Image (cartoon, rainbow, N blue to C red):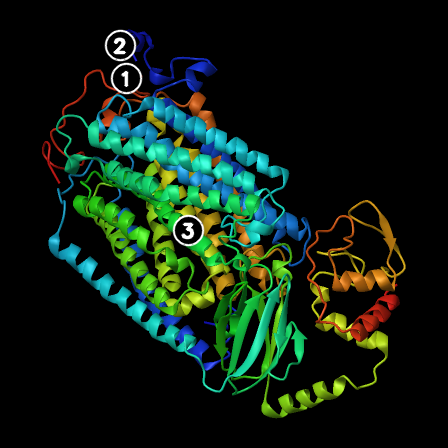
Amino acid sequence: MNQLFDIPGAASKISGEVDSVFLYILLVGLFFFVVTQGALIYFALRYRKKKGEPERETPYITSNRALETIWIVIPSILVLSIFYYGYTVYMKMQAPMPGAQEIGVVAKQWLWEFTYPDGRKAVNELHVQTGKPVGLSMTSEDVIHSLYLPDFRIKQDILPGRYTKMYLLPDRPGEYQIFCAEYCGQGHSLMLGKLIVMDAHEYAEWSGRQAGESQAAMPPARRGEELVKNSGCLGCHTTDGSPRVGPSLKGLFGRRVELSDGSSVTADEDYLKESMTDPGAKVVKGYANVMPTFKGTLSDADITDIISYMKTLK
Amino acid sequence: MSEEKAAQSGPGRGYLEEKGWRSWAYTLDHKRIGVMYLFTTLFFFLLGGVFGMLIRLELLTPGPTFFSDQTYNEMFTMHGSMMIFLFIIPGIPSGLGNFLIPLMIGARDVAFPRLNLASYWLFIMGIIVILFSLAHPMDTGWTFYTPYSAKTAASVTVLSFGIFLVGMSSILTGLNFIVTIHQLRATGMSWLRMPLFIWSMYATSIIQVVATPVIGMTFILLAMERLFGIGLFDPDKGGDPLLFQHFFWFYSHPVVYVMILPAMGAISEIIPTFSRKPIFGYKAIAYSSIAIALAGFLVWGHHMFVAGMSVYADVIFSILTFSVAIPTGVKVFNWIATLYKGSISLDSPMLYALTFIFLFIVGGLTGPFLGSLATDVHLTDTYFVVAHFHYTMMGGTVMGLFAGLHYWFPKLTGRMLDERPAKTAWAIIVVGFNITFFTMFITGMQGMPRRFAEYPEKYQAGNVISSIGAAILAFGILVMFYNYVRCMFRGAPAPADPWRGKTLEWTVPSPPPTENFETIPTVTGWPYSYGGKGDGDA
């Protein structure tokens, strides 16, 4: 059935159990569906008085104790069983997993920032290893968000000012979609992330590469392009000239831009840097002041490389 | 109203006799006030529907095609808030309720006619204030969750005030109905001889009076948060955004029963009339209305299973939620049992009523997926929820309203509806509705979150199907409204009791005279003695 409707297959053991609860409710539902809709349609057609037919005499039935008892007791039992089944699986989902790798999650309009145990940070992409439990400790910098992994059948709201937790045990390598499921403003549907599950070997390789990457010599513009891709910029800014939540990066460098206060400024290195570290200072006309600061997320070297990349976008 | 005045009204025009806008704006007649509510709320149904169609238009493609993301967010907020606050909450209770309650219990008017008129004008004032908020259109969704609603540039403060006024009107109407039902029943109409529509309106009114003050208070707090920064919902100042959600759902969950109970009441009248059989399980249906109203106050937390509440609160809210399923199921079983061995005429009111049951069963049976904790975590905030509540609210409440409008149209206007366009519209609506919303169950199971202006390409097929269905649905509704408007002026004159109903409103001419009853009737039995000999009781 999952394939028929293109429903994502369960990506972990617990999500398989959620699917079983779903199937159970579906079976109980189908039973009632067939009984009630069957009776409804059958009666409506069987006892239908056709046009011109004389009125049939109808029996005077006002209640039936036995019948009414049955249709209170049986649904009550079935409904309680649904509750209990859903409850047991839910408690398993909520239980902390011993030895879980702690990942910090900061949600903000409109990107995900992940912090690995060794302090490394990543935006919108979280790499984890199969068979190793992960505990996400999540908080928000602005409004309420919700981290939703459809393949894992889990979601948890993320609130400002407190931490909520979510555990998962990835079983199958692959790339899984992360959505924000709680409406959070203009860019809500663009707040997309990826959970990348790797087997032990791949993960080790990726880890090593990450560690070496900071020293790796890459042309600045090339490195800037990677940073733009990996820092969530593309959620709001395009590189093809079309406006999205924010102005496009294409042809931006060196151009004169009109600001929301009526003045204008040339988009040079200083302006672009300021726009990344203090986005509210000079907002481009026609756009809302909604960009989060990247101060602390992007180093000065990162910003320089991003600007080098932007110079290539003519 | 004096008796001379009533005598003046010519035959066949009844309460509609008097002309001129003053005769409407200053009227104390519950029937006229009911009609004004119907016109106002149906206008917002159509307007909200236009926004719904624009949403479906934009969702034809994954990226922004017709509207920007921001405009899309404003449109779904408009669609939701208009449909909920200006159509579905006041629609049946204030519209049909006002028109029918005094007629059905054998009274000349509601207990407080002046208060009734004040409620209507408060409602209109609320609407005007809400229209002012369009200066900076709302983009919060109809749920107004903080801190987003406290921070957005949209006119949340203005809108809060508007909804406060609309809520005030709702409270006063509920109060009026409770007193009317207690005090003004005709001689002999004991509680267990009341039509089931009255029982459901009584339950509805209790919820309106008890729950609505909470939303009024919540919106005042939200406005204060924005104006003075009191910080009740702001974590930086020691507040809690979850508190807003608790307040909000403490009203907004019970209020779904304000929406559905009156529709259930209408169905409970229509099914026995067209089956020529007494309603099965009268007491069960009557008491289940009250049970639903009371239990409905204890389940608000099921909107918040993933919001960050304590796990134990989740568990308790889940089990309480399932307790509402039982009285709801009982009603459905009773309606179906009423059909058994009936002599069923499938006229348009009956078709809509049977469709209500059909669609409401689908809506009801998809509820446990969301009430059960494990599956709710996956499905909440996805299109599965959107599908579920459109099946209960549109398939249920709105279909119940349509059934009621077809059933009482002769009484409201003194004219009959054309059956053929009514049935054509019905067929188109049923097809369009199911294509639109059944598909959303699947889109939701595939994981598409709601309130998404843009979506990954893999969801496009489902969205296109839903949009096509929506176009069909909209066409059906236009046919239906065309029929209403045409027959309001051109329909064949209606007899007093075209459907051979047994409730009291059918004993007076169509349309009823201003004072309703020449002499107040004496009631000697319950109103469902079909197929029986003489008057019976439950």
Q: Nearer the viewer, mark 3 or mark 1?
A: 3
Helix, strand, or loop for circle 1?
loop
- Judge from the rendering whether residue B528 lies leftward or rightward of residue B112; answer left or right: left
In the figure, B496 relative to B351: above or below? above
- For label 1, the residue is B515
Among numbered discs 3 and 1, the one appearing first in the sequence: 3
* Res. B229 mark: none
Distance of mark 1 from mark 2, alpha carbons? Answer: 8 Å
Image location (x, y in percent) of residue B293: 29, 47
Please give the name of the residue rendered at 22% of the width and 46% of the height, measured from the top-left corner.
B285
Please identify the quarter of the rendering in which residue B17 is found: top left
Please tell me which residue lies in front, A6 or A147: A147
Q: Quick check: can you spot residue B61?
A: yes
Among numbered discs 1 and 2, the one appearing first in the sequence: 2
- Judge from the rendering whether residue B121 lies leftward or rightward of residue B71; answer left or right: left
Image location (x, y in percent) of residue B78: 55, 43
Q: Are marks 1 and 2 in contact (CB under 8 Å)?
A: yes
Helix, strand, or loop for circle 3?
helix
